[in-house]
Image: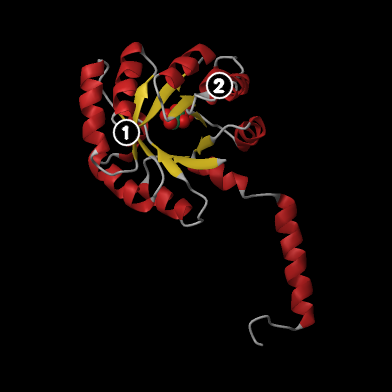
Amino acid sequence: MKFFVDTADVAEIRDLAATGLVDGVTTNPSLVAKSGRDFFEVLEEICDIVDGPVSAEVAATDSDTMLAEGKALSKIAKNIAVKVPLTRDGLKACKALSGDGIMVNVTLCFSAAQAILAAKAGATFVSPFVGRLDDIGSDGMALIADIVDIYDAYANFDTEVLVASIRHPMHVVDSAKMGAHVATVPPAVLRAMFNHPLTDKGLAAFLVDWEKTGQSILDR
Ligand code: E4P
């Protein structure tokens, strides 16, 4: 399973990438606005830090302008994945961009029917938003299970399921159990995944006992 970090905060990306556990990054217009930074500048910096796919979202809603924006974004670095919304125009742009060999992340997916269309349009990734479905009383993870099952049934569907709108570690665990290819994880959720009180307690006890031995591993 691949881990993408869901942020446009370069300091956070640099810090988390240093763990060696980050396979890519996703941004969206809200995250870019939150960063307060120039879009192209931020993307250049992120693409320098992370070798894997870095999603950059178009701002247009018609396919011709999405295509032009997608081509402009793809020139920033070879690891840019152009993000388009799951609309008719978005899928038209997806088909054209993926035909040109550009990675495409189809975002704002809320149904299995939409995910089928994204795969048909040659998307590299489809992003179902689990948290936003949970927010309105729908079962976000049930959608992931459906999409994974459907994609598994067709050898010619190469689109990877990128679980988005993740709110807590259990969304990541459940995604992994279902065989989703990628989870894009907000920095706070990724940090929370490292923690367990029994790890802290166990480590404290081991350190106390090691001290009692009076030995040093490096003084050999
Ligand atoms: C990532 O690609 C999505 O834009 C992001 O996960 C959406 O998350 P949110 O629902 O918390 O805004």
Query: Which residue is pictured at 34% across the width and 47% down the height?
Result: 46
- Residue type highlighted by circle 1: Ile
From the top left corner, tell me how far across and down residue 7 is, in percent. Answer: 41, 39
Q: Nearer the viewer, mark 2 or mark 1?
A: 2
Q: Quadrant of ligand 1?
A: top left
Left or right: 106 with respect to 151? left
Which residue position holds label 2? 154
Q: Is residue 87 above or below residue 189?
A: above
User: Residue 135's spot in the image, x, y percent?
Assistant: 55, 19
Helix, strand or loop at mark 1: loop
- Residue 167 visible to an observer of this rendering: yes
Give the class, few, some or many, for how many residues have Cα within 10 Å of label 1's Cα (few <14, many ≥20). Answer: many
In the rendered view, how is the structure colored?
Answer: secondary structure
Q: Secondary structure at mark 2?
A: loop
**Closer to the camera in the image, 16 or 208:** 16
Residue where numbered disc 1 is placed? 102
Image quarter (top left, top right, bottom left or bottom right) of the C terminus: bottom right
- Residue 149 coordinates in the image, percent (x, y): 62, 22
- Looking at marks 2 and 1 on the same chain, the residue that comes earlier in the sequence is marked by 1
Measured in 3D between alpha carbons, the distance from the residue under mark 2 to the one under mark 1, in whole angstroms, is 22 Å
Kind of residue sitting beneath label 2 = Tyr
Q: Quadrant of the N terminus?
A: top right
Query: As drawn, is 179 to the left or to the right of 81?
Result: right
- Which residue lies at the image location 26% right of the left edge and 29% below the top edge? 70
Is residue 125 or residue 139 the one in the foreground? 125
Is there any visible trace of residue 38 in the rendered image?
no
Q: Quadrant of residue 56?
A: top left
Side of 211 where 67 appears, left or right: left
Report whether 153 appears left or right of 8: right
Work out whether residue 123 or residue 39 is closer to the camera in this orientation and state it: 123
Instruction: Tell which residue pokes out farthest to the front in this image.
Output: 155
Residue 62, quarter of the rendered image: top left
